Image: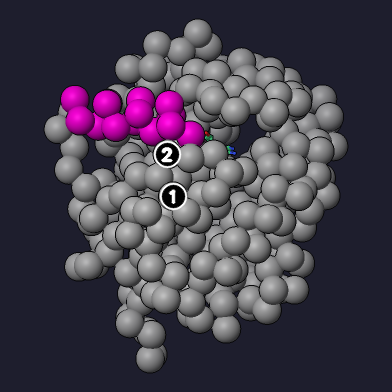
Amino acid sequence: MTYELRDWDIVSGVGITALGVAAARAVETSRADPLVRDPYAADFVRAAESPIPMPAQAEDVADDDLRWSLMSVFLGLRSRHLDEYLLDSCRASGESPGARQVVLLAAGLDSRAFRLPWPEGVTVYEVDQPRVLAFKDAVLARGGAEPGCARRVAAVDLRDDWAAALAGNGFDPAMPTSWLAEGLMPYLPGDAAEQLLTTVHELSAPGSTIAVEYMPGVDSVLADSSAASLSAGLGIDLASLLADSDYDPNAGLAELGWTVDEVTVAQLADRYGRTFDDEHVAELAGNGRYLTARKR
Ligand SMILES: C[S@@+](CC[C@H](N)C(=O)[O-])C[C@H]1O[C@@H](n2cnc3c(N)ncnc32)[C@H](O)[C@@H]1O
């Protein structure tokens, strides 16, 4: 487990996982009828010059190579579901005017600030490691990308005082916020995960929401031989990056008084018309979870 590292870039440590998921979004984007359209993902992959080869489009993936095909479906489902969560949480409903602050925790190469149709007045805050965000901004600037919202970048480690970094960028805890922790929980040691959600709670006005991706027992899932070979085949040693944690964010948020709902990846696959033929993959999909929660 290399998580003690403090300063990684886009091709090292946990940083390379951000490139891996961008590659999966690039593959999915280039398919017919994609679950996500991320026009920036391929640019990131091409610019990174990763020591581990990664595809920038479906044509780069051999027909018999199931690894990236599966990753593109998993990442497509995740992107589609969380795109809908974020846009819904910014939409007015009942007495709520909808959130005007969105915080992407561990934003990595997430390009939602640029690719989603945000309502007027939304500010998107992106929090991640300085070198990951510097790479991202350089690629976006080279391509002339313009955000469709106000965008603020907080380059800070999520184990340090990221609340101060957000405040320094204009974040207002008195306003309802839509939070996202996508592809982050599996890497956080239990105490860091608990601290992260406690800080989210302290910074959240009533009506704030959060979506969190997590996988209970992720280390034992990866010990399964087919999951281990999938991860090895991607060229990323996930087992060495994942935290050995049994922290349960669903129970943690409920204890903090939030109302929590949850779907599995398998349920999302049903919702969006995708199927998993392989029994081990179907098991992985049954294990992967997305919770959404609201502060009362
Ligand atoms: C799998 S990527 C997910 C990126 C993005 N959410 C997405 O889905 O495209 C994991 C991200 O978590 C970030 N990360 C992990 N631990 C972090 C920490 N302690 N502080 C800041 N960023 C962290 C990494 O830099 C990386 O960008």
Magenta highlight range: 129-142
Q: Residue at x 53, y 11 (%)?
A: 52
Q: Nearer the viewer, mark 2 or mark 1?
A: 1
Q: Position of residue 55 (x, y in %)?
A: 43, 19
User: Dot 1, crowdedness within 10 Å: few (<14), some or many (≥20)?
Assistant: some
Disc 1 marks a residue whose amino acid type is Ala
Q: Name the residue furthest bottom.
A: 95
Picture disc at residue 69: none
Placement of 248 over or under 246, stated as above or below: below
Q: Nearer the viewer, residue 280 or 220?
A: 220
Q: Where, quadrant-wise, is the N terminus in this rendering?
A: top right
Q: Position of residue 212 (x, y in %)?
A: 59, 56
Q: Residue at x 65, y 46 (%)?
A: 185
Residue, disc 2: 155
Residue, disc 1: 165
Q: Position of residue 178 (x, y in %)?
A: 44, 65
Of the image marks 2 and 1, the number of the one nearer the N terminus:
2
Q: Are marks 2 and 1 in contact (CB under 8 Å)?
A: yes
